[in-house]
Amino acid sequence: MYDILRTSIEKAWENRELLKNEDIRSAIHQVIDLLDKGLLRAAEPTAEGWQVNEWVKKAVILYFPTRPMETITTGPFEYHDKITLKQDYAEQGVRVVPPAAARYGAYVAPGVVMMPSYINIGAYVDSGTMVDTWATVGSCAQIGKQVHLSGGVGIGGVLEPVQAAPVIIEDHCFIGSRCIVVEGAHLEREVVLGANTVITASTKIIDVTGQEPVEYQGYVPARSVVIPGTRKKQFPAGEYDVPCALIIGKRKASTDLKTSLNSALREFDVPV
Protein backbone atom coordinates (compact mmCIF):
# COMPACT_ATOMS: atom_id res chain seq x y z
CA MET A 1 0.00 0.00 0.00
CA TYR A 2 2.84 2.34 0.86
CA ASP A 3 5.47 0.86 -1.50
CA ILE A 4 6.13 4.13 -3.34
CA LEU A 5 6.67 6.02 -0.08
CA ARG A 6 8.89 3.27 1.24
CA THR A 7 11.04 3.27 -1.90
CA SER A 8 11.55 7.03 -1.62
CA ILE A 9 12.51 6.77 2.05
CA GLU A 10 14.99 3.97 1.42
CA LYS A 11 16.64 5.93 -1.40
CA ALA A 12 17.01 9.02 0.78
CA TRP A 13 18.39 6.92 3.61
CA GLU A 14 21.18 5.69 1.37
CA ASN A 15 21.83 9.09 -0.22
CA ARG A 16 21.13 12.14 1.96
CA GLU A 17 21.72 14.45 -1.02
CA LEU A 18 18.25 13.38 -2.15
CA LEU A 19 16.78 15.36 0.75
CA LYS A 20 17.12 18.38 -1.53
CA ASN A 21 14.60 16.78 -3.88
CA GLU A 22 11.07 18.09 -3.33
CA ASP A 23 9.45 14.74 -4.14
CA ILE A 24 11.59 13.00 -1.54
CA ARG A 25 10.81 15.66 1.07
CA SER A 26 7.13 15.30 0.25
CA ALA A 27 7.31 11.54 0.76
CA ILE A 28 8.95 12.01 4.17
CA HIS A 29 6.30 14.51 5.22
CA GLN A 30 3.54 12.16 4.06
CA VAL A 31 4.92 9.40 6.29
CA ILE A 32 4.97 11.72 9.31
CA ASP A 33 1.39 12.78 8.58
CA LEU A 34 0.33 9.13 8.38
CA LEU A 35 2.04 8.48 11.73
CA ASP A 36 0.24 11.48 13.20
CA LYS A 37 -3.11 10.05 12.08
CA GLY A 38 -2.32 6.52 13.28
CA LEU A 39 -2.44 5.09 9.77
CA LEU A 40 1.21 4.01 9.91
CA ARG A 41 3.13 2.72 12.91
CA ALA A 42 6.82 2.33 13.73
CA ALA A 43 5.94 -1.15 15.00
CA GLU A 44 2.73 -3.14 14.78
CA PRO A 45 1.26 -6.45 15.92
CA THR A 46 1.00 -9.22 13.33
CA ALA A 47 -0.05 -12.85 13.42
CA GLU A 48 3.65 -13.75 13.89
CA GLY A 49 4.26 -11.19 16.63
CA TRP A 50 5.34 -7.57 16.67
CA GLN A 51 6.95 -6.25 13.50
CA VAL A 52 9.31 -3.24 13.47
CA ASN A 53 8.80 -1.06 10.40
CA GLU A 54 12.36 0.12 9.92
CA TRP A 55 11.55 2.32 6.94
CA VAL A 56 9.04 4.29 9.01
CA LYS A 57 11.69 4.95 11.68
CA LYS A 58 14.06 6.04 8.91
CA ALA A 59 11.43 8.56 7.76
CA VAL A 60 11.25 10.02 11.28
CA ILE A 61 15.03 10.43 11.37
CA LEU A 62 15.05 12.00 7.89
CA TYR A 63 12.25 14.38 8.85
CA PHE A 64 14.48 16.41 11.17
CA PRO A 65 16.94 17.71 8.54
CA THR A 66 14.01 18.73 6.31
CA ARG A 67 12.61 21.04 8.98
CA PRO A 68 13.89 24.53 9.87
CA MET A 69 14.20 25.73 13.45
CA GLU A 70 11.31 28.01 14.31
CA THR A 71 9.79 29.77 17.28
CA ILE A 72 6.48 28.26 18.40
CA THR A 73 4.25 30.25 20.73
CA THR A 74 1.38 28.69 22.67
CA GLY A 75 -0.23 31.15 25.06
CA PRO A 76 2.48 32.24 27.52
CA PHE A 77 4.79 29.39 26.45
CA GLU A 78 7.51 29.78 23.84
CA TYR A 79 9.43 26.95 22.18
CA HIS A 80 12.25 26.83 19.63
CA ASP A 81 12.23 23.58 17.70
CA LYS A 82 11.97 21.88 14.31
CA ILE A 83 8.73 20.01 14.94
CA THR A 84 5.35 21.55 15.69
CA LEU A 85 2.96 20.34 18.38
CA LYS A 86 -0.19 18.35 17.76
CA GLN A 87 -3.38 20.35 17.53
CA ASP A 88 -7.16 19.92 17.16
CA TYR A 89 -7.54 17.70 20.21
CA ALA A 90 -11.27 18.38 20.50
CA GLU A 91 -11.83 16.93 17.02
CA GLN A 92 -9.73 13.91 17.96
CA GLY A 93 -11.57 13.30 21.23
CA VAL A 94 -8.46 13.66 23.38
CA ARG A 95 -8.40 15.40 26.77
CA VAL A 96 -5.22 17.44 27.27
CA VAL A 97 -4.45 19.17 30.58
CA PRO A 98 -2.05 22.15 30.37
CA PRO A 99 0.89 22.08 29.88
CA ALA A 100 0.83 18.59 28.35
CA ALA A 101 2.34 18.32 24.89
CA ALA A 102 2.55 15.81 22.07
CA ARG A 103 4.71 16.34 19.02
CA TYR A 104 3.28 16.26 15.52
CA GLY A 105 3.89 12.75 14.19
CA ALA A 106 2.72 11.04 17.39
CA TYR A 107 -0.64 9.32 17.31
CA VAL A 108 -2.95 9.91 20.26
CA ALA A 109 -6.23 7.98 19.95
CA PRO A 110 -9.72 9.13 20.97
CA GLY A 111 -10.35 8.73 24.68
CA VAL A 112 -6.74 9.27 25.73
CA VAL A 113 -6.23 11.58 28.72
CA MET A 114 -2.98 13.53 28.85
CA MET A 115 -2.24 15.05 32.23
CA PRO A 116 0.78 17.40 32.17
CA SER A 117 2.95 14.95 30.22
CA TYR A 118 4.89 14.51 26.98
CA ILE A 119 4.52 12.25 23.94
CA ASN A 120 7.30 12.23 21.35
CA ILE A 121 7.18 11.88 17.56
CA GLY A 122 6.50 8.40 16.21
CA ALA A 123 4.79 7.18 19.39
CA TYR A 124 1.42 5.43 19.25
CA VAL A 125 -0.94 5.78 22.22
CA ASP A 126 -4.16 3.80 21.86
CA SER A 127 -7.67 4.59 23.04
CA GLY A 128 -8.64 5.00 26.68
CA THR A 129 -5.07 5.30 27.94
CA MET A 130 -4.18 7.66 30.80
CA VAL A 131 -0.81 9.42 30.51
CA ASP A 132 -0.50 10.77 34.02
CA THR A 133 1.38 13.77 35.38
CA TRP A 134 5.02 14.07 34.24
CA ALA A 135 4.89 10.75 32.44
CA THR A 136 6.84 10.67 29.18
CA VAL A 137 6.30 8.48 26.11
CA GLY A 138 9.43 8.29 23.99
CA SER A 139 9.76 8.29 20.21
CA CYS A 140 8.14 5.31 18.48
CA ALA A 141 6.97 3.71 21.75
CA GLN A 142 3.80 1.64 21.34
CA ILE A 143 1.18 1.96 24.08
CA GLY A 144 -1.97 -0.16 23.97
CA LYS A 145 -5.60 0.42 24.89
CA GLN A 146 -6.73 1.25 28.44
CA VAL A 147 -3.17 1.50 29.75
CA HIS A 148 -2.44 3.61 32.83
CA LEU A 149 0.95 5.31 32.88
CA SER A 150 1.14 6.64 36.44
CA GLY A 151 2.85 9.82 37.59
CA GLY A 152 6.48 10.21 36.58
CA VAL A 153 6.63 7.06 34.43
CA GLY A 154 9.38 7.07 31.82
CA ILE A 155 8.71 5.13 28.63
CA GLY A 156 11.89 5.14 26.56
CA GLY A 157 12.11 6.03 22.90
CA VAL A 158 14.26 4.62 20.14
CA LEU A 159 15.06 5.78 16.62
CA GLU A 160 18.50 4.30 16.02
CA PRO A 161 19.51 1.66 15.31
CA VAL A 162 16.49 1.50 13.03
CA GLN A 163 16.18 -2.28 13.42
CA ALA A 164 15.79 -1.95 17.20
CA ALA A 165 12.32 -2.60 18.57
CA PRO A 166 10.66 0.24 20.45
CA VAL A 167 9.14 -0.18 23.89
CA ILE A 168 5.86 -2.07 23.58
CA ILE A 169 3.21 -1.96 26.30
CA GLU A 170 0.15 -3.97 25.36
CA ASP A 171 -3.51 -3.40 26.30
CA HIS A 172 -4.75 -2.95 29.89
CA CYS A 173 -1.32 -2.66 31.54
CA PHE A 174 -0.91 -0.65 34.74
CA ILE A 175 2.48 1.05 35.14
CA GLY A 176 3.05 2.30 38.68
CA SER A 177 4.53 5.62 39.74
CA ARG A 178 8.13 6.37 38.70
CA CYS A 179 8.54 3.15 36.74
CA ILE A 180 11.02 3.12 33.87
CA VAL A 181 10.52 0.94 30.79
CA VAL A 182 13.23 1.40 28.13
CA GLU A 183 15.46 -0.24 25.50
CA GLY A 184 12.72 -2.03 23.61
CA ALA A 185 11.28 -3.85 26.62
CA HIS A 186 7.98 -5.60 25.89
CA LEU A 187 5.11 -5.90 28.37
CA GLU A 188 2.32 -8.23 27.34
CA ARG A 189 -1.37 -7.61 28.10
CA GLU A 190 -2.57 -6.74 31.60
CA VAL A 191 0.86 -6.53 33.25
CA VAL A 192 1.04 -4.59 36.53
CA LEU A 193 4.32 -2.89 37.45
CA GLY A 194 4.65 -1.73 41.05
CA ALA A 195 6.14 1.69 41.77
CA ASN A 196 9.79 2.26 40.86
CA THR A 197 10.13 -0.93 38.82
CA VAL A 198 12.80 -0.64 36.11
CA ILE A 199 12.59 -2.81 33.00
CA THR A 200 15.42 -2.56 30.46
CA ALA A 201 16.72 -4.88 27.77
CA SER A 202 19.13 -6.40 30.31
CA THR A 203 16.97 -6.42 33.45
CA LYS A 204 16.64 -9.87 34.98
CA ILE A 205 12.90 -10.44 35.40
CA ILE A 206 12.48 -13.36 37.79
CA ASP A 207 9.25 -15.26 38.35
CA VAL A 208 9.41 -16.28 42.02
CA THR A 209 5.92 -17.79 42.26
CA GLY A 210 7.00 -21.40 41.79
CA GLN A 211 9.39 -23.78 43.52
CA GLU A 212 12.22 -22.65 41.24
CA PRO A 213 12.87 -19.18 39.81
CA VAL A 214 12.14 -18.63 36.11
CA GLU A 215 14.05 -15.83 34.37
CA TYR A 216 12.98 -13.53 31.55
CA GLN A 217 14.90 -10.66 30.00
CA GLY A 218 13.42 -7.60 28.26
CA TYR A 219 10.00 -9.23 28.31
CA VAL A 220 7.19 -9.56 30.86
CA PRO A 221 4.51 -12.26 30.29
CA ALA A 222 0.83 -11.38 30.27
CA ARG A 223 -0.97 -10.57 33.55
CA SER A 224 2.24 -10.61 35.60
CA VAL A 225 2.37 -8.53 38.78
CA VAL A 226 5.92 -7.18 39.07
CA ILE A 227 7.81 -5.34 41.81
CA PRO A 228 11.42 -4.12 42.16
CA GLY A 229 13.87 -6.58 43.69
CA THR A 230 17.56 -7.33 44.05
CA ARG A 231 19.76 -10.34 43.44
CA LYS A 232 23.27 -11.26 44.48
CA LYS A 233 26.07 -10.83 41.96
CA GLN A 234 29.75 -11.53 42.41
CA PHE A 235 32.24 -8.81 41.42
CA PRO A 236 36.06 -8.74 41.80
CA ALA A 237 35.59 -6.57 44.89
CA GLY A 238 33.00 -8.87 46.44
CA GLU A 239 29.34 -9.85 46.31
CA TYR A 240 26.74 -7.11 45.98
CA ASP A 241 23.01 -6.71 45.47
CA VAL A 242 22.04 -5.56 41.96
CA PRO A 243 18.58 -4.52 40.77
CA CYS A 244 16.14 -6.93 39.18
CA ALA A 245 12.38 -7.24 38.83
CA LEU A 246 10.30 -9.92 40.55
CA ILE A 247 7.11 -11.48 39.21
CA ILE A 248 5.19 -12.18 42.41
CA GLY A 249 1.84 -13.28 40.98
CA LYS A 250 -0.70 -13.07 38.19
CA ARG A 251 -3.78 -10.98 37.66
CA LYS A 252 -6.84 -13.18 37.46
CA ALA A 253 -8.15 -13.41 33.91
CA SER A 254 -11.68 -13.90 35.21
CA THR A 255 -11.71 -10.58 37.07
CA ASP A 256 -12.98 -7.37 35.50
CA LEU A 257 -9.95 -5.56 34.07
CA LYS A 258 -10.37 -2.32 36.00
CA THR A 259 -11.22 -4.12 39.22
CA SER A 260 -8.30 -6.49 38.84
CA LEU A 261 -5.86 -3.59 38.70
CA ASN A 262 -6.79 -2.57 42.21
CA SER A 263 -7.27 -6.09 43.53
CA ALA A 264 -3.90 -7.22 42.19
CA LEU A 265 -2.18 -4.35 43.93
CA ARG A 266 -3.99 -5.01 47.21
CA GLU A 267 -3.53 -8.77 47.06
CA PHE A 268 0.21 -8.58 46.61
CA ASP A 269 0.82 -5.37 48.59
CA VAL A 270 2.30 -3.66 45.54
CA PRO A 271 2.95 0.09 46.00
CA VAL A 272 1.87 2.41 43.17
Image (cartoon, helix red, strand yellow):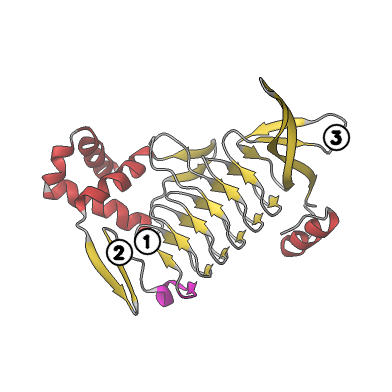
Residue at 12% x, 50% y: name it.
22
Residue annotated with mark 3:
210
Q: Label 2 is placed on what type of residue?
A: Thr
Give the Cα distance between marks 1 and 2: 6 Å
Quadrant, the C terminus: bottom right
Residue annotated with mark 1:
103
Residue at 60% x, 36% y: name it.
218
Residue at 34% x, 79% y: name it.
76
- Counting from the top left corner in percent of width and height, residue 138 is at 46, 52
- Counting from the top left corner in percent of width and height, residue 105 is at 35, 57
Residue at 81% x, 37% y: name it.
208
- Counting from the top left corner in percent of width and height, residue 6 is at 28, 41
Q: Label 1 is placed on what type of residue?
A: Arg
Say which label, 1 or 2, has the lower sequence index: 2
Asked if residue 105 shows in the view, the reply is yes
Tell me the element at label 2. loop
Say which label, 2 or 3, has the lower sequence index: 2
Residues in magenta, as a range: 89-98
Give the Cα distance between marks 2 and 3: 50 Å
Say which label, 1 or 3, has the lower sequence index: 1
- From the viewer's perspective, tell me whether residue 41 is left or right of residue 25: right
- From the viewer's perspective, tell me whether residue 8 is left or right of residue 199: left
Give the Cα distance between marks 1 and 3: 44 Å
Asked if residue 1 shows in the view, the reply is no
Residue positioned most to the bottom? 75
